[in-house]
Structure formats: structure tokens, C-alpha cells
Image: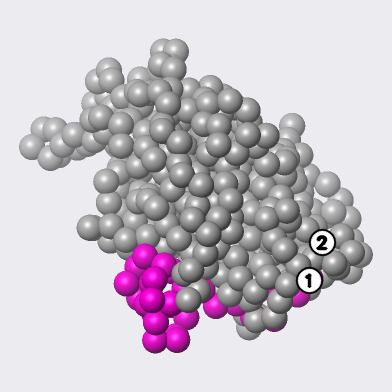
Amino acid sequence: MRRISIVLAVLIAAAVFIAIRSSHSEATLDLLLPGADPVTFIGNGGYSADGLGQISAGGTIQAEVPAGSTVVGAWLYATTVGGGDTTALGFDGNAVTLTPLAQTDPAGYSFSTTRADVTSIVAAKVGGGGGITNFTIDDAPTSPLLDGVALVVIFSNPGLPEQSIAVMDGGLSVTPSTTVLNFGSPIDTTVPGFSATLSLGIQFSYQGAPGNVCSGGQYSTVDINGSRLTSCAGNYDDGEGQDGALLTVGGVGDSTDIPADPNATDTGTDDELYGISSFITNGDTSLSIVNENPSGDDSIFLAVLSITGQVSGVSGEICNDQRDNDGDTLIDTADPDCIFPTPTPSPTASPSPTPTATPAALPPTGGPAADSGGLPWLAAAGALALMGGGAWLAYQRRRAR
């Protein structure tokens, strides 16, 4: 079906937030710390990531774990749009309770991200690994509108390189966001097999064509150390082109190749999984990341940064949130950490082709069927309307610009 791209590279041990400010709330991606390590995982091993958007129950989400491995952590994410939280899901026949992540930005399209620790379920089924393991998602995207799910699995394996794995989750839906990662010691790119990787999970994104094809309209841009990495992150690579299934996660079945033209918004391909080794110079002590969503209507809910070898420590200064994030008493641009090359300007958003007709959009539980029209991508006209005195939300189907 799909192959999981396991990044045999050390995820940057980063206490990093990708944060932005809006008039409604602050949205961030916060570091997941399940144990005593300064990051999600440090040791010989790797990770698997996958996503699923579906319009009916029973779809499959996958984990790829090589033979001789031990699952040490697994997390299930649910992304919701239109208000409310998805706090209960059927996961491979198990009733799972998910906890809302407070740092998700609810503004505009009322995004929500919830998370559950499913380590015991995944470990029991995967065992010692040896290939791809399928897990079913037993729920359809009913109200509040479940927009898709993601599964992140971390495993140890003595036969693999040492890695530091940082999983960051929450939700970014207002742009731009700037993050500076400061490493406790200089990065050594001369380590044999050095590799650095960035993986993104994005919900509620639509570019008009299925799969990883860049079709313009609704996309996010990413700059690394002042250089453009991609201008077409997003789309529904792991889902379907209608409300309730708009999801992509860099990992399963994806390539780490960066887009051939990083400034193109409507040509080429983008898997939301990027090899960023060429953006890092030997001896670097920091890394800057700038995310922007010109259409203003996507939510980046998951990010994984990876680098070979063990990074001794990381602190981060977010350069536009009016806070002293790294404890040096300097805020935003007053902090020398925020002096880095000017990012490549974002291209002007190009219109997306109008999608072919799809079944009626899913209504909230107990509500009538949605009218024709579109639940637009972030910042597209007319997304949610209160109807019937506010008794229910009529979700309009997405209309490409």
C-alpha cells in the first residue's frame, strides 16, 4: 500500500516551539516529553509517521518498524475543524480517549488537535517489528468534524544509528511564524551518514489535485536558515479531496526529496517530508525556521525535526511572540538569536482549479445535510455559518479559489 519513510537520522533535540500570535490566541507546536530525556527520545532507533483522512469509518493508518525493534512510544492525533474537540476514537478495535492540546489556535476555523498515548496498543500488535503494521480508524468524520488522524511511533533498535527524536504538536493556523533553535554544541556534519530531516503534519489543506502534486491555492511555505525549502506544503496526500478527509503527514510512503523548484506553488511535488542536510553547515549552533501560509487557512499540527548524532541541548527564541522564550531577558528581535538571513519572499498564491463534484458535505450530528457551496480552505470565502438560531453549524464544502 504505502511505505513508511523511516528517517534513520537523529531528530533535533529541540525544545522548540513554532509559534505565532493572533488577535484571538497564541498557537504553538510544543515539544512532547514523555520521559526524563530532554527530547522525546534519545538512543539507537527511529520513528514512523503516518496520516489518514477518511469520509467513512474503517480506513487504515500504518506504522513501519524494522525487525529487532522495540516500540517505546506511540501517539495518536485527531485534528478537528469547525468547533469542539475529538476526544474519543475507535483505534483498531480499542476505545481511545484523547486529550485536547491547549496550544492549538482555535481562531478563524476553530481548529483543534487532540492526542492519546497508544503505546501499549501499538507495541502489542507490532511486537518485534519486521515490516508494516496496519491499524484501523473505526470512526467517521462526524460533528465536530474530524478532519483526519495521525500516528507517530518511536522505536529503539540496537542496529540503527543513535538518534535524538523531537516530536512537536499543537496547531499553527496564523502566519507567519519564526523559530530559532539554539544547540548546546555545534552541529557536526562530518559524522558518517549525517542526515537532517523535517516532517510536517497539516490539516484542512486543499490544492485541487490528489496526492503530493503541487496545484497552488492553499499551501504553506517553509524557509530554513533564510533559504526557501518549499512553497507548496499541504494538500490531502493522506486523505480525500473533501471536508473530513483533508490531511497530509510527511512519513508513510513519502520521499525526503525537497521540491525541485522550492519557489513553485503549482508545479512539482511535495511530500511534507524533507531532507534538510544541505541547509546546515558544519559548526552551526542554531537553526532558523520560518513558516507561512499565504492563504491563511491551514493548520500545521505536527512537526518532527531530525539530525544525526546526539545534540546536547537546545533552547529556542520565538521571534514574534513578545516573550523571552530562552531566558536571556531579550525579547523577539532584541535577541541576537533572531538576527538571521531574510527569508525568501513568499510567492503570490495562485488559484486552485475547481474540484469535481463530491458528495454532500458532512453535517454536524443531528443537523440537516449541508447546502451546496464550500467549506473553504483557510481564508477562502464563507466557511462556517451559524444557522437555525445557532442550533447547528452548516458546513459548506470547500471551494477552491
Where disc 1 sits, the SS reads loop
- Residue type marked 2: Phe
Question: Going by the image, does 147 lie left or right of 180?
Answer: left
Compared with residue 319, is residue 239 higher up or lower down, i.e. above or below?
A: above
- Residue 189, how many percent across, how many down? 79, 66
- Residue 286, how many percent across, how many down? 61, 71
Disc 1 designates what residue? 188
Q: CA distance from mark 2 to mark 1?
A: 8 Å
- Residue 105, how many percent across, how many down? 34, 56
Answer whether residue 316 is magenta in the image: yes
Camera-side residue of 348 and 196: 348
Magenta stretch: give its range. 309-335
Observer able to see residue 389 = yes
Disc 2 designates what residue? 194
Observer able to see residue 78 = no
**Residue positioned 64% across, 54% down in the render:** 198
- Residue type marked 1: Asp
